[in-house]
């Protein structure tokens, strides 16, 4: 068991590396593992040692590393195949390997200043925790200034929100003992930038839990949280890249892969049948979009799964190619569902080496790896019988031309009136971005336009129902009703009459296709009552 | 992102407090660079009864914020700081001279039951940066109009003189700020032009030429009728601030006597000869009294190049007002004033009634005012021409609008959106109250129309605006 643990640690300490886990672990990082173990253990009776001096007792049995890779015996060979050089398919931007260079950037250089969006995370004591560009060390004095500004305003019984200059907006957010700052030239609204910082905060919570963070800083105000987050900068980097390029974050909704409802139903049934006690969510993902999700009945009665949690989960998986190795069993916190406890996530790609289809099984029982792995085998078997994988491979995002409306270049549609809405996962649908939005630059520009309209429509003080914007390169229409939220992009010369017609046609088309575009009725299953959950509630 | 629900009426007792001025100060960081010298940086601070250390701290915060933003862009430092309770606006008026205005956010006080203390909720998104930033810059422009630049004051009399001037000016001026009624028009800082036919316009021009020829001391002239501009010899930037002064300060002060009836004791002494209705608004209140002392206000124009200090003579006859500007190095004697009075008085009186007649004729021809039907605001960046059918007569106190303040803020948002790009654009929005707001930007001109047509759709709204443009703004806006 010990040896396995060492291998686990070797893998976890350097998520960035593509080395198979059998490589010699970096033993000097043992103390960090144990600190994480301490954090993960929520039972309250902690050895009252100085958190900086990691207690060594809990670590090993607890599998307390932030990411624990447990390798099923049969899959050892596959690691070599799946690992080297491939871009993690679940990360859209595929730039996760670029992380090492960020940290070495010269923070005095013009190029550093020119980044579109800086994000900084620091503790209340001014200790740096994370910087998107440049190393936190090099930026510690800048972060010190940020903390000084926060404290200064606080001392007059006030709270700092933001600073505006011609080129940039600086947004401050304090969550518990953490201070998050965004310095952006993207011209987004403060509300949106703050929402993005919240995502960063939640991603950190997903790794450590909110209860732990609070406790650590209560014990020691100037604790260096980097000790616990070592190796996870990549995950935050990946999150920020996704936030910039993926509209799911803006819409707070999950993107589904369009699928014939019969296929989706058959997949759901497969998942529904492969359950085990304490299994809470079964999620199937392909090409970074949701295929189906099956949920435990009683759990979902109490609280619903928020899209943000799914986004954080997808980012975590996509941020590291280490997840492509066979099967992963990792503790993860779903911050919006419950910020103070861990779920245990079983992650496995069903189609190595392409690794486009991912199965995610969440359990509340950390000892359930083998039972959950067994579920996966049953699922795999059933999918093989039904040739599901080849059918899934044929599914792909649709082109806007399928709607049959000329002038319409692109849209994003998010319905509110899905069945059982208040318990369902919020979704949206959107076609491929095609010409003239075929370059990354043009896609970012279109997304910026959508973001701006979203900001205006959802303004906290003067929200709107509709925006029609005729600009030089496109005409955009954003519309919020009680039933849906819609963003459309037309060619700039479209007339208002045409635009209205187009939208009517579009809404009709979506209605016709809704069974294919959305998960309308997420199936449920029932597993035995969840002792861990109630246990946590009593903490 | 995570949606925040719009403000909802709570049903409890609620009292809304408008935005108000918290503090206003002028500082120069280079005046007290060393520790212990911080007080020297502060050139003016309102309210003055704030404790010295508190002033130093507040100025220090501004410096820190500006410095911090320079980390990311050295050439474009901070313009505003948002906090929960207030907004601070920064303006580097002249090299290293900073002016800061701190405005308290509007807030709502909700009374609680059971004798609990009332809860206070700050409304942090109500103030528009563009509006109050413009108000701040206007404060500087107004100061500069009457006092010249900071640098010149320093050159003339050092820090002491500058501090004196700042104190004297801002102490009074800040009392006239009505921050709760600032809106888009402050962003424009425009000038209302008086619509005239060619003939009358030429009459006015030749009048100006004649006077300038006869009184060669006159450097610049401006001609206004009914608080609207007809002719100006000044540069645009100088004219727009002078216009603001005239229409919000000088004219309102002098309008009451005129409106009073013939026999009212308020009517100014019209001595002896009733040859004309002309009188001085600045300078000698009664030209016939030889003992009375008088003084013309001094203004500074063209501060960026020729830097001229001028006497400002404002002379009015009925609804026509003329400004004559003469170099301050000249001494203006009583004789000169009498000369001007006898020259200008009769001519201006005649001209004023001509204009009035012509105006009435035009109105009869064009029929009853169509404009009130449409609520709109128009502004032309090129000549600063501004027109609003939403605002009632502007006075020094409040500029009343006939639409809900939230709609004005939406207009402000659209204006911000227009400023993001150079190209012509159109933005149409439907507010939660079902009002439609249409913004059009074309070639340096901006037009905002508010339509109260709850059941209209986009196409109908478009048609309405087209109608407005066809009648009022022929050939100006590119139509769909």
Image (tube, helix red, strand yellow):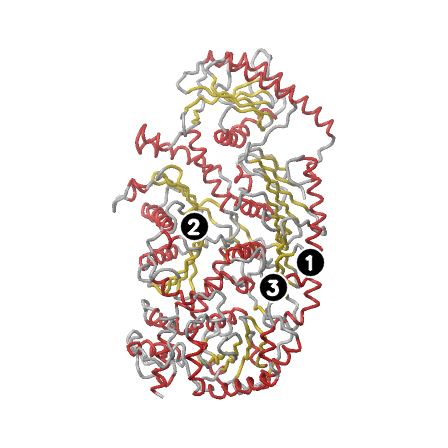
Q: Which chain carries label 3?
A: A
Q: Where is residue A468 in the image (x, y as percent from the top left)?
A: 63, 51
Closer to the camera: disc 1 or disc 2?
1
Task: Identify the residue at horizontal 58%, vertical 22% (top origin).
Answer: B267
Indicate the quadrant where residue B297 lies.
top left
Closer to the camera: disc 3 or disc 1?
1
Which residue is denoted by mark 1 in the rendering?
Answer: A405
Task: Identify the residue at horizontal 60%, vertical 12% (top origin).
Answer: B275
Task: Identify the residue at horizontal 53%, vertical 24% (top origin).
Answer: B232
How far, Cα to Cα, is label 3 from label 2? 38 Å
Which residue is denoted by mark 3 in the rendering?
Answer: A430
Q: Nearer the viewer, residue A256 or B176?
A: A256
How far, Cα to Cα, is label 3 from label 1? 15 Å
Whether residue A232 sits left or right of residue B19 in the image: it is left
Classify mark 2: helix, strand or loop. Answer: strand
Closer to the camera: disc 3 or disc 2?
3
Q: Which of A449 and A354 is in front in this view?
A: A354
Q: Which chain carries label 2?
A: B
Classify mark 1: helix, strand or loop. Answer: loop
Indicate the quadrant where residue B332 lies.
top left
Q: How many residues crowd mark 1 within 10 Å: few (<14), some (14–19), many (20+)?
A: some
**Quadrant into which the C terminus of chain B falls:** top right
Whether residue B50 sits left or right of residue B248 in the image: it is left
Q: Looking at the image, can residue B7 be seen?
A: no
Q: Where is residue A416 in the image (x, y as percent from the top left)?
A: 64, 66
Classify mark 3: helix, strand or loop. Answer: loop
Which residue is denoted by mark 2 in the rendering?
Answer: B81
């Amino acid at each position: 068991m010990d040896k396995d643990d060492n291998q686990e640690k070797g893998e976890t300490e350097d998520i960035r590396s593509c080395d198979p886990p059998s490589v010699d672990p970096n033993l000097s990082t043992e103390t960090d593992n144990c600190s994480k173990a301490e954090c993960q253990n929520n039972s309250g009776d902690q050895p009252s040692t100085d958190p900086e001096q990691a207690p060594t007792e809990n670590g090993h049995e607890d599998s307390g590393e932030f990411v624990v890779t447990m390798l099923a015996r049969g899959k050892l060979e596959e690691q070599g195949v799946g690992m080297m050089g491939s871009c993690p398919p679940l990360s859209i931007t595929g730039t996760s390997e670029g992380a090492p260079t960020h940290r070495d950037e010269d923070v005095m250089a013009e190029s550093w200043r020119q980044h579109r969006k800086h994000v900084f995370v620091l503790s209340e004591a001014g200790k740096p925790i994370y910087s998107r560009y440049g190393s936190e060390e090099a930026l510690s004095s800048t972060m010190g200034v940020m903390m000084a500004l926060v404290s200064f305003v606080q001392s007059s019984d006030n709270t700092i929100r933001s600073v505006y200059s011609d080129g940039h907006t600086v947004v401050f957010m304090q969550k518990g003992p953490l201070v998050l700052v965004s310095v952006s030239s993207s011209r987004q609204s403060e509300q949106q930038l703050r929402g993005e910082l919240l995502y960063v905060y939640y991603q950190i919570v997903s790794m450590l839990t909110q209860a732990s963070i609070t406790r650590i800083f209560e014990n020691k105000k100037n604790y260096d949280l980097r000790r616990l987050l070592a190796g996870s900068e990549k995950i935050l980097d990946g999150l920020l890249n996704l936030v910039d390029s993926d509209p799911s974050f803006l819409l707070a909704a999950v993107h589904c892969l369009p699928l014939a409802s019969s296929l989706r139903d058959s997949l759901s049934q497969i998942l529904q049948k492969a359950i085990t006690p304490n299994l809470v969510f079964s999620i199937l993902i392909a090409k970074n979009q949701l295929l189906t999700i099956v949920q435990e009945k009683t759990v979902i009665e109490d609280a619903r799964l928020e899209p943000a949690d799914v986004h954080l989960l997808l980012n975590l998986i996509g941020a590291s190619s280490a997840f492509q190795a066979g099967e992963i069993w990792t503790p993860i916190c779903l911050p919006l569902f419950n910020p103070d406890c861990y779920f245990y996530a079983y992650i496995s790609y069903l189609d190595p080496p392409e690794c486009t289809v991912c199965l995610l099984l969440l359990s509340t029982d950390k000892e359930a790896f083998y039972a959950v792995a067994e579920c996966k085998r049953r699922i795999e078997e059933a999918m093989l019988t039904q040739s599901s994988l080849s059918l899934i491979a044929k599914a792909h995002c649709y082109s806007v031309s399928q709607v049959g409306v000329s002038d319409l270049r692109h849209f994003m549609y998010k319905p509110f009136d899905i069945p059982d809405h208040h318990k369902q996962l919020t979704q949206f649908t959107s076609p491929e971005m095609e010409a003239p939005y075929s370059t990354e630059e043009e896609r970012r520009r279109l997304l910026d336009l959508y973001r701006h309209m979203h900001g205006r429509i959802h303004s906290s003080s003067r929200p709107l129902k509709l925006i029609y914007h005729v600009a030089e390169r496109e005409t955009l229409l954003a519309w919020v009703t009680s039933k849906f939220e819609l963003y459309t992009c037309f060619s700039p010369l479209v007339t208002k009459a045409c635009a209205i017609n187009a939208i009517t046609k579009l809404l009709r088309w979506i209605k016709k296709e809704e069974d294919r575009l959305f998960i309308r009725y997420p199936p449920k299953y029932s597993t035995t009552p969840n002792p861990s959950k109630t246990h946590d509630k009593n903490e | 992102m995570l949606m925040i629900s719009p403000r909802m009426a709570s049903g409890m007792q609620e009292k809304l407090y408008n935005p108000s001025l918290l503090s206003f100060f002028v500082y120069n960081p280079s005046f007290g660079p060393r520790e212990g010298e911080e007080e020297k940086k502060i050139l003016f601070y309102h309210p003055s009864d704030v404790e010295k250390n508190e002033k130093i701290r507040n100025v220090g915060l501004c410096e820190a914020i500006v410095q911090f933003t320079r980390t990311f862009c050295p050439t474009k430092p901070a313009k505003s700081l948002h906090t929960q309770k207030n907004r601070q606006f920064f303006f580097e008026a002249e090299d290293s001279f900073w002016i800061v205005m701190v405005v308290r956010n509007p807030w709502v006080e909700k009374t609680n039951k059971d004798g609990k203390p009332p809860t206070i909720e700050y409304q942090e998104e109500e103030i528009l940066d563009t509006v109050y930033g413009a108000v701040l810059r206007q404060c500087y422009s107004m100061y500069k109009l009457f006092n010249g630049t900071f640098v010149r004051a320093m050159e003339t009399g050092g820090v002491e003189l500058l501090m004196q001037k700042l104190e004297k000016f801002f102490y009074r001026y800040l009392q006239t700020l009505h921050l709760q009624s600032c809106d888009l028009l402050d962003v424009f800082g425009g000038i209302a032009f008086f619509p005239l036919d060619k003939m009358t316009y030429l009459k006015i021009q030749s009048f100006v030429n004649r006077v300038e020829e006869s009184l060669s001391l006159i450097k610049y002239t401006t001609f206004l009728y009914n608080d609207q501009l007809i002719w100006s010899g000044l540069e645009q930037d100088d004219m727009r601030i002078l216009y603001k002064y005239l229409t919000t300060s000088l004219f309102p002060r002098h309008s009451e006597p005129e409106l009073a009836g013939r026999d009212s004791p308020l009517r100014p002494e019209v001595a002896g000869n009733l040859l004309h209705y002309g009188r001085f608004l600045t300078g000698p209140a009664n030209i016939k009294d030889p003992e009375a002392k008088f003084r013309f206000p001094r203004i500074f124009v063209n501060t960026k190049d020729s830097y001229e200090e001028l006497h400002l003579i404002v002379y009015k006859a009925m609804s026509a007002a003329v400004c004559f500007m003469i170099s301050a190095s000249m001494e203006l004697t009583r004789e000169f004033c009498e000369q001007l009075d006898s020259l200008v008085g009769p001519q201006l009186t005649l001209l004023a009634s001509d204009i009035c007649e012509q105006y009435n004729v035009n109105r009869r021809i064009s029929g009853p005012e169509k404009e009130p039907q449409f609520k709109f605001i128009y502004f032309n960046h090129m000549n600063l021409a501004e027109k609003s059918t939403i605002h009632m007569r502007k006075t020094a106190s409040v500029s009343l609008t006939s639409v809900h303040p939230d709609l004005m803020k939406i207009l402000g948002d659209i204006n911000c959106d227009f400023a993001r790009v150079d190209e012509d654009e159109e933005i149409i929005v439907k507010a939660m109250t079902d009002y439609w707001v249409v913004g059009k930007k074309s070639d340096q001109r901006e037009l905002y129309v508010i339509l109260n047509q709850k059941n209209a759709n986009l196409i109908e709204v478009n048609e309405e605006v087209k109608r407005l443009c066809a009648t009022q703004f022929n050939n100006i806006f590119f139509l769909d």
